[in-house]
Image: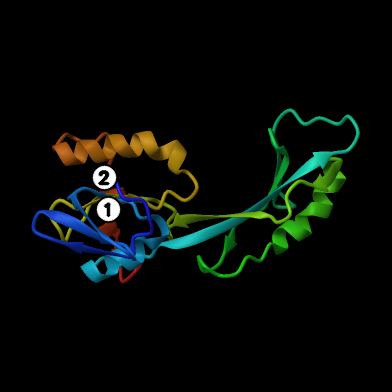
């Protein structure tokens, strides 16, 4: 198992080669779930999959007085959530659409914090800088699950758009059924990579 950032995939007769900056990993043909790098890796193999990135921010806060929060709450109009965590109260923003490696711009967090303080008695920041996460998504918000139509033995499972932990088991089931030739429990074509024409949903 090689851990690192895969920069390019190439297809051999018996294996996939994942090219890292300092090494090449040759693995048996199988799944391809390279997250937000998958578009760059798969484009040279002829797959035009319009994977984008949703970014989001959060910050943990202390609590003033003896206030408690027993469950997550969401302000739909304000576009933020508060959740009790072991580290403190987490303020989470909505989605930011930006380039994966663009500089952080936590303007939503700065806008939401005063609104959150009106809703709950937040105290001091518990971190020096906000956390920022990146999640892969597709234009139709449906993951790509299934075989690579252009290459025998190449299978995909990516683009779950924040829901990978929830959808992981059912994704594994669907992929296993397709790989072994069983009747899929749901319509597999909904998730096929070939559903995109010129980079947009057909």
Question: Which residue is located at x 56 percent, y 70 percent?
Answer: 102
State the residue position of label 1: 192
Compared with 53, 3 (above or below) is above
As rendered, which of 154 and 198 lies closer to the eye?
154
Provide residue 117's location: percent of width, then percent of height: 85, 47
Question: Which residue is located at x 45 percent, y 39 percent?
Answer: 165
Check disc 2 and report its element: helix, strand or loop.
helix
Provide residue 75's location: percent of width, then percent of height: 73, 45
Give left or right: position of 23 versus 90.
Answer: left
Question: Which residue is located at x 81 percent, y 40 percent?
Answer: 62
Check disc 1 and report its element: helix, strand or loop.
loop
Provide residue 88's location: percent of width, then percent of height: 74, 38
State the residue position of label 2: 188
Q: Are marks 1 and 2 in contact (CB under 8 Å)?
A: yes
Give left or right: position of 98 versus 201.
Answer: right
Structural crowding at the residue carrying mark 2, measured as other residues with C-alpha within 10 Å and reported as few (<14), some (14–19) or many (≥20): some
As rendered, which of 19 and 101 lies closer to the eye?
19
The answer to whether any part of residue 26 appears in the image is yes
Structural crowding at the residue carrying mark 1, measured as other residues with C-alpha within 10 Å and reported as few (<14), some (14–19) or many (≥20): some
Q: Quadrant for residue 36, please give it.
A: bottom left
């Amino acid at each position: 198992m090689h851990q690192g950032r895969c920069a390019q995939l190439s297809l051999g007769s018996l294996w996939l080669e994942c090219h890292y900056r300092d090494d090449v990993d040759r693995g048996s043909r199988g799944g391809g779930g390279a997250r937000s790098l998958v578009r760059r890796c798969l484009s040279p193999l002829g797959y035009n999959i319009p994977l984008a990135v949703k970014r989001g921010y959060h910050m943990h806060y202390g609590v003033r007085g003896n206030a408690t929060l027993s469950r997550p709450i969401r302000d739909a109009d304000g576009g933020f959530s508060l959740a009790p965590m072991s580290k403190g109260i987490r303020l989470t923003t909505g989605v930011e659409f930006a380039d994966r490696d663009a500089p952080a711009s936590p303007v939503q967090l700065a806008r939401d914090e005063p609104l959150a303080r009106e809703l709950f008695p937040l105290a001091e920041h518990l971190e020096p800088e906000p956390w920022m996460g990146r999640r892969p998504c597709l234009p139709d918000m449906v993951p790509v699950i299934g075989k690579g139509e252009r290459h025998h033995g190449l299978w995909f499972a990516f683009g779950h758009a924040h829901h990978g932990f929830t959808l992981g088991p059912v994704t594994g089931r669907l992929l296993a059924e397709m790989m072994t030739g069983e009747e899929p429990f749901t319509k597999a074509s909904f998730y096929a990579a070939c559903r995109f024409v010129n980079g947009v949903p057909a």
